[in-house]
């Protein structure tokens, strides 16, 4: 399997270089992406592919079910680097329909460490139990929960000190929520974008 992977890489690099001789030289010289993408680790949802972007145009963080944990140092480090160093102005939280992580969060089955990771999704399911109960099937209920998880992710990113400080300095950074359809390959805007001026009220001790 490894030999096959390496052989496919050689073929891909040769074809890419033949189609665009300066491609790799440009990528090596500068990383200047326009987008920071927080997405699911699902192998069917590669950020640059579904968004129609070249690798150098999107800086990516992925985890199971695109959950935004406020104490996830991996995500926060990537977010800080994107905002402070790369000066990215568009942040996208992207979930997808048919998400295995969302499905696992709705099951009364043990999933090991994933159960701890997916706890915020179960919390959302409890908070929106009435709305979710109105869905016509388990599939539509899970897809609705996937949408709610994205909206919550946008909110959580916006409330981080990283974004709050950037906005207080006047940085024009915007956060968007998208959902991807595995069945049709389409990205949909969930209309939950935030930007400069979205400040969280902090009470003094």
Image (cartoon, rainbow, N blue to C red):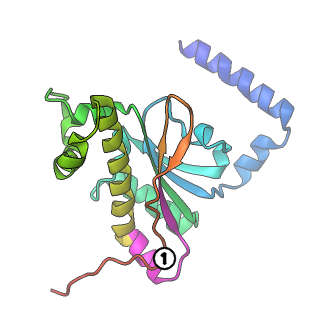
Range of magenta residues = 162-177
* Residue at image mark 1: 196
Mark 1: secondary structure: loop
Q: Residue at x 33, y 42 (%)?
A: 144
Percent x, y of residue 178: 48, 49
The reply to whether the magenta stretch includes residue 145 is: no
Q: Residue at x 48, y 71 (%)?
A: 195
Question: Disc count in the image?
Answer: 1
In the image, 51: left or right of 12?
A: left
In the image, 108: left or right of 201?
A: left
- Quadrant containing the C terminus is bottom left
Q: Residue at x 65, y 55 (%)?
A: 31
Percent x, y of residue 82: 52, 61
Percent x, y of residue 25: 78, 45
In the image, 49: left or right of 196?
A: right
In the image, 11: left or right of 107?
A: right
The reply to whether the magenta stretch includes residue 165 is: yes
154 versus 204 height, above or below? above
Q: Residue at x 49, y 35 (%)?
A: 181
Percent x, y of residue 129: 18, 46
């Amino acid at each position: 399997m490894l030999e096959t992977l390496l052989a496919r890489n050689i073929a891909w690099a040769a074809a890419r270089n033949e189609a665009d001789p300066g491609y790799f030289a440009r990528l090596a010289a500068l990383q200047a992406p326009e987008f920071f993408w927080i997405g699911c680790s699902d192998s069917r949802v590669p950020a640059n592919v579904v968004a129609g972007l070249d690798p150098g145009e999107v800086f990516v963080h992925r985890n199971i079910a695109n959950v935004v944990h406020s104490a996830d140092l991996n995500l926060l480090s990537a977010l800080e680097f994107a905002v402070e160093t790369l000066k990215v102005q568009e942040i996208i939280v992207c979930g997808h329909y048919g998400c295995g992580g969302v499905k696992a969060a709705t099951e009364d089955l043990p999933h090991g460490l994933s159960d701890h990771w997916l706890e915020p999704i179960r919390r959302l399911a409890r908070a929106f139990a009435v709305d979710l109960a109105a869905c016509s099937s388990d599939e539509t209920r899970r897809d609705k929960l996937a949408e709610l998880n994205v909206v919550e992710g946008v909110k959580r990113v916006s409330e981080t000190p990283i974004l709050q400080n950037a906005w207080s300095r006047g940085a024009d950074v915007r956060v968007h929520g998208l959902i991807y359809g595995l069945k049709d390959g389409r990205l949909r805007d969930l209309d939950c974008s935030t930007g400069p001026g979205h400040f969280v009220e902090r009470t003094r001790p």
